[in-house]
Image (spheres, rainbow, N blue to C red):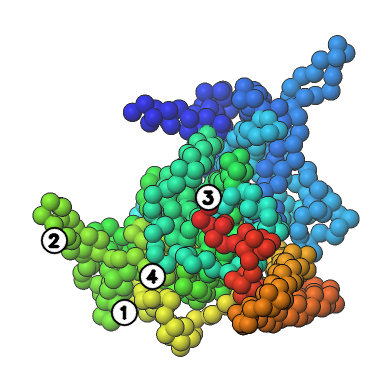
Amino acid sequence: MEEYTKVTELFGCDVFNDSVMKARLPGKVYKELKKIMAEGGELSMEVADVVAHEMKEWAIDKGATHFTHWFQPLTGVTAEKHDAFITAPREDGKVLMSFSGKELIKGEPDASSFPSGGLRATFEARGYTTWDCTSPAFVRHDAAGGILCIPTAFCSYTGEALDQKTPLLRSMEAINTQALRLLRLFGNTTSKRVIPSVGAEQEYFLIDKEKWRQRKDLIYTGRTLFGAMPPKGQEMDDHYLGTIRQRVSAYMKEVNEECWRLGVTAKTQHNEVAPAQHELAPIFAPANIAADQNQIMMRILKKVASRRGMRCLLHEKPFAGLNGSGKHNNWSLTTDDGINLLEPGKTPHENIQFLLVLTCILRAVDLHADLLREAAADVGNDQRLGGQEAPPAVISVFLGEQLEDVLEQLISTGTATHSKHGEKLETGVKTLPDFMKDATDRNRTSPFAFTGNKFEFRMVGSNDSISTCNVVLNTIAAESFRDACDRLEAAPDFAMAVHDLIKEYATEHQRIVFNGNGYAPEWAEEAKRRGLPNLPSMVDAIPALTTDRAVKLFEDFGVFTRAELESRAEIQYEVYAKAINIEAKTMIDMATKQIIPAVIHYTTVLANSVNAVKAAGAIDVSVQMDLLKKTSRLLKSANSAMSKLAKLTEQVNSNPEGRERALFMREKIVPAMEGLREPVDELEMLVDKDMWPIPSYGDLIFDV
């Protein structure tokens, strides 16, 4: 009980949350701010000044000396510029600490220095950050002291979104409007908002910092570009949910405490499948807050690891041959008064509202599968998706036996008359209680799986922002809700119209439902027969952003303009090309300066050994000679592959920027990188370990 009390006192202690606002703000100011947070609107400067003053006083009490507008540009990381609270010195040489409503609401970073995909010229520098009052401010403590962080959106001088938060907030407004229309049709007059709620499970690797320092590939790219598998990997499945090592347990305890202080509901932690891999999962939160908190969580994971002599790897595939890391995005729709629109109830066949919501979502995913796939497009994810460890690149929906049976009834007869229920699970052990099992098992191979009262989008990469996929989920669902409401509001007989619409959507979009093994090679053929898109790489997925259908979708709901979509596509191509180019150059650097010299040294020692043994009068030196020949052959292959890769990297800039350069990287550079890795990894298995210049996989994943 004592530990529980400590956690409750710790949780949110560095967050300017509702209890702090209620205690510090005048009643009238508090009510106006809460109303704007719930319903939207513009905060008056008078109220903003009061809020800013109290926020500043609270932050100073927490040890803060500076404030920052904390935002999420299209760089893949957060950004911040720190300003001290101090004002100009008075005549007596002393300073005051001040923070105005204007400073709270608006900031002005240099927009030209962030990716814009052509939206802004480099000489056009002005951009704005604006306070997202629905996501609470917090004080972050680090080596710089206390910093008041104010979550903000970031846009250009001409109003285009240059960040992750702005389109997410737009999409939340879109789905709220359309979901409320749907609820009103079913007689709900009390709910005022529908909020997309998200819980993002975060996977990561931990390795020793000193060994990380010895690997340029990990330093520059976040993943190993060379490395032979050790005798043992994850074959025994003994790491998954295994006893957590003491060093890692201490790390997790500190991570939890830092998360809790900042209001991040870190709840579940465990060892993942691969050695040195772990997972941390929070409780659900509104989508924009969940996205902010996931960024906070990733920073804490990295910061605490560094303090404890480790390094946290968030790359999607840091080790070839081992499972990579993802971020399972659990998504649901909940009203402000606690109604979950994805709750089927005990008899889902009778829950007409749920069936309409469900079939609308099936329609949305089927119509926009390419967009949903693009939402998980990331350079590191190319090495993860489609393998026997993560969802395939083909989008499908898992519903489970119960809901699939209900849909089949609707499709075949037009009416669902029953729902399957779970049976008693008998363990066969008298001392263990029998209990009722769920009506449906889970499917870990599905990209988009229904898991009781939510959908789990399992494709997101571990280092990626969850904002992107939730923008897509919110907007495509809003479109289907809108189209359904347009028809139902005009129907003379609502009951008959909703029945027909559910059957229509279930019938027309049943091809997206797949409950089988997504890893099976037969599924790829079946998906092709069904006409489902298969987009294996990031470069294949990016064009989905700028199709006429995508542009119409996002413009209809004010989430993106065509220009914003085209800019994001350009940024994606640029990110892909730059990331692969860095990896290629890192491989060349390591091969030239470390690996090839080490192998030459080893062959020299081996050759000298052969000569020495011969000189000593030994007759048989065949073992040494075979090893020398094999090593020399692989050395020649590695040097040839390295030269080929180097020549190709010289051609990168001769390809026009954008899609053409990204295609060159994927089709020419990536195969050349694989061609260099193959002989080097073979050499690692031959060369004396004391002479091999970099820590092996075994050193990295089993010594934490």
The amino acid type, in three-letter code, at marker 1 is Ile
Whole-angstrom CA distance, mark 3 to mark 1, is: 54 Å
- Please tell me whether mark 4 sits on a helix, a strand or a loop: strand
* 4 or 3: tag closer to the N-terminus: 4
Which residue matches tag 4? 398
Q: On the picture, is 273 further left or further right than 690?
A: left
Question: Image quadrant of residue 512?
Answer: bottom left
- Please tell me whether mark 1 sits on a helix, a strand or a loop: helix
Task: Using a 10 Å C-alpha cutoff, classify the residue at mark 4 as few (fewer than 14 neighbours), some (14 to 19) or many (20 or more).
Answer: many
Q: Is residue 554 above or below residue 661?
A: above
* 1 or 4: tag closer to the N-terminus: 4
Residue at 35% x, 55% y: name it. 187
* Marks 4 and 3 in Cβ contact (< 8 Å): no
Q: Is residue 257 above or below residue 154?
A: above
Q: On the picture, is 488 further left or further right than 157?
A: left
What label does residue 704 carry, if any? 3
The amino acid type, in three-letter code, at marker 4 is Phe
Residue at 78% x, 62% y: name it. 119
Whole-angstrom CA distance, mark 2 to mark 4, is: 30 Å
The amino acid type, in three-letter code, at marker 2 is Gly
Which residue matches tag 2? 428
Q: Nearer the viewer, residue 494 or 329?
A: 329
Q: Is residue 253 above or below residue 629?
A: above
* Marks 2 and 3 in Cβ contact (< 8 Å): no
Foreground disc of the pair 2, 3: 3
Q: Position of residue 302 (x, y in %)?
A: 60, 47
- Please tell me whether mark 2 sits on a helix, a strand or a loop: loop
Q: Residue furthest top?
A: 92
Foreground disc of the pair 3, 1: 3
The amino acid type, in three-letter code, at marker 3 is Val
Which residue matches tag 1? 411
